[in-house]
Image (cartoon, rainbow, N blue to C red):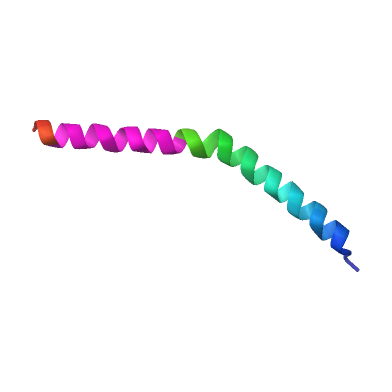
Amino acid sequence: EISSRQVQEHNEVGNMIFWFFFSIVGQPMCVLLYYHDVMNRQAQTNG
């Protein structure tokens, strides 16, 4: 039988993994994609 305490602990671990992964990989990736998009738009307008 799985108690609600075990489920709660599992959710906390999953949450920690998600935020750890997101803050290290997700945010720089968003910045790089935004930078890439801006550079592409400048290149298109400059011809």
- In the image, residue 35 lies in the stretch drawn in magenta: yes
Residue at x-position 53% and y-position 36%: 25
Q: Is residue 39 above or below residue 9?
A: above
Q: Is residue 38 above or below residue 11?
A: above
Q: Position of residue 28 (x, y in %)?
A: 47, 33
Q: Is residue 37 above or below residue 4?
A: above
Q: Position of residue 12 (x, y in %)?
A: 75, 49
Count every numbered label the image shows and give the total.
0
- Quarter holding the N terminus is bottom right
Q: Quadrant of residue 7?
A: bottom right
**Is 12 positioned to the left or the right of 38 in the image?**
right
**Is 23 positioned to the left or the right of 43 in the image?**
right
Residue at x-position 33% and y-position 32%: 35
Report the magenta residues as a range: 29-44
- Quarter holding the C terminus is top left
- In the image, residue 41 lies in the stretch drawn in magenta: yes
Residue at x-position 89% and y-position 64%: 3
**Is 44 positioned to the left or the right of 23 in the image?**
left
**Is 22 positioned to the left or the right of 12 in the image?**
left
Residue at x-position 37% and y-position 38%: 33
Q: Position of residue 27 (x, y in %)?
A: 49, 36
Q: Residue furthest bottom?
A: 1
Q: Residue furthest right?
A: 1
Q: Quadrant of residue 16?
A: top right
Main SS of residues in magenta: helix
Q: Quadrant of residue 44?
A: top left
